[in-house]
Image (cartoon, rainbow, N blue to C red):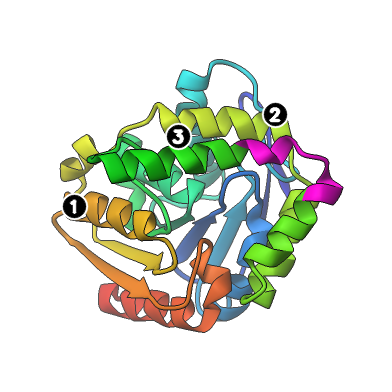
C-alpha cells in the first residue's frame, strides 16, 4: 500500500478503483481500514481513497501544538490530493473524521464537491444542563483508553455486541491504538467550534447519524441546520460508527446522495 511523503510527515493511504473520487476519513484513533465495506461497495464505480491521518494507523507521528492539529492534518490531505491530481472530491468523515471534514471544507472549499458527515459534531459546547452532564460523562469515559488493553477489550465487546462487524473493527482499533496521539486529537476536538462557521459552506452536505445516543442526534442536528444545502438521515439501531453498525443502510444513503449529485 502506498505511503506519501508530505512536506512534514509520511501519510499512508489506499487508492482503489477509478471514477469520481470519494475520500473517506476515519474516526478517532482509527485508520482507513474501518472503511473496508465502503471500499468494496464503491470502488467498482468510483476512485476510493482512505488515508490514515497523521498520528493514526500507519501514518507519521503527530507532534506540535494541539491548536494546529486539524490545520496540519488538512494540509496533509490537500498535498495528497495535489499529488494524486485530484482537483475536487467528495469527502465522507465518520466521528472525528466528520470534525476533520468540516475543517477541510472550510479551509479548502475549492477542493470539495460535497461532504458526508457521520456520527459527528460541529462543536462540543453544551446548550443546556442535560447536554453538559452528558458531555462531561463522555469526556470522563474517554480516559478509559489508558486502561490496559486486556481490560478495554471486554468493554468494547459488551458495547458493540449487537453489531458484530463494528465490534470486530473497534476491537482492532483498540489493540492498535496510538494512545498519546489519540488524546491530542481529542483535545483538538474540544477546542474546535465549526458550528458558528458552517453557514459559509456552499457545497451539498449529507448528515447520517445513528439513533442510539440522544446527544449524537442533538449535535448533528445543530450542525446540519447551519448548512444551507444539507439533509440529515437518522439510522435506527445504530451507534458510532454507523458505516459499520448498519453498513447496508449507510451504503444505500451514500449511493443515493451520489446519484443525486451525479457524482
Q: Is residue 146 magenta?
A: yes
Q: Looking at the rendered structure, which numbered label has been put on residue 180?
A: 2
Near mark 1 (Cα within 10 A), the count class, few <14, some 14-19 or many ≥20, is many
Residue at x 42% of width, y 83% of height: 252
Front one among 154 and 30: 154
Name the mark on residue 189: 3
Q: Residue at x 43, y 58 (%)?
A: 119
- For mark 2, give the secondary structure: helix
According to the image, label 1 marks what residue? Answer: 227
Give the answer, above or below, for where 3 lies relative to 158. above
- Is residue 9 rendered to the left or right of residue 124? right
Q: Classify residue 113 by image quadrant.
A: bottom left
- Could you tell me which quadrant the C terminus lies in? bottom left
Q: Closer to the N terminus: mark 1 or mark 2? A: 2
Residue 13 placement (x, y as % from top left): 66, 51
Q: Nearer the viewer, mark 1 or mark 2?
A: 2
Query: Is there CB contact under 8 Å for labels 1 and 2?
Result: no
Q: Which residues are magenta?
A: 143-151
User: Residue 45 versus residue 260: which sits nearer the camera?
Assistant: 260
Q: Decide whether the magenta segment is chiefly helix, strand or loop.
A: helix
Residue 169: x and y in percent read 70, 64
Amino acid at each position: 500500500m502506498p505511503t506519501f511523503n508530505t512536506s512534514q510527515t509520511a501519510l499512508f493511504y489506499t487508492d482503489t478503483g477509478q471514477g469520481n473520487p470519494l475520500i473517506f476519513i476515519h474516526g478517532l484513533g482509527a485508520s482507513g481500514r474501518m472503511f473496508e465495506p465502503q471500499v468494496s461497495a464503491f470502488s467498482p464505480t468510483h476512485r476510493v481513497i482512505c488515508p490514515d491521518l497523521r498520528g493514526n494507523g500507519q501514518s507519521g507521528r503527530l507532534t506540535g501544538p494541539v491548536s494546529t492539529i486539524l490545520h496540519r492534518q488538512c494540509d496533509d490531505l490537500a498535498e495528497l490530493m495535489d499529488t494524486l491530481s485530484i482537483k475536487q472530491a467528495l469527502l465522507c468523515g465518520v466521528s472525528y473524521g466528520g470534525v476533520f471534514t468540516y475543517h477541510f471544507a472550510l479551509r479548502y472549499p475549492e477542493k470539495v464537491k460535497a461532504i458526508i458527515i457521520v456520527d459527528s459534531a460541529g462543536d462540543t459546547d453544551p446548550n443546556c444542563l442535560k447536554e453538559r452532564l452528558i458531555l462531561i460523562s463522555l469526556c470522563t469515559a474517554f480516559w478509559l483508553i489508558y486502561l490496559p488493553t486486556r481490560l478495554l477489550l471486554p468493554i468494547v465487546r459488551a458495547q458493540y455486541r449487537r453489531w458484530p462487524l463494528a465490534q470486530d473493527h473497534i476491537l482492532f482499533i483498540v489493540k492498535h491504538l496510538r494512545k498519546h496521539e489519540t488524546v491530542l486529537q481529542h483535545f483538538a476536538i474540544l477546542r474546535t467550534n465549526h458550528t458558528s462557521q458552517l453557514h459559509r459552506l456552499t457545497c451539498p452536505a449529507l448528515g447520517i447519524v445513528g439513533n442510539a445516543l440522544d446527544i449524537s442526534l442533538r449535535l448533528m442536528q445543530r450542525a446540519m441546520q447551519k448548512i444551507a444545502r444539507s439533509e440529515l438521515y437518522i439510522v435506527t439501531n445504530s451507534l458510532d460508527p454507523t458505516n459499520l453498525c448498519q453498513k447496508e443502510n449507510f451504503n444505500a444513503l451514500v449511493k443515493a446522495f451520489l446519484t443525486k449529485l451525479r457524482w
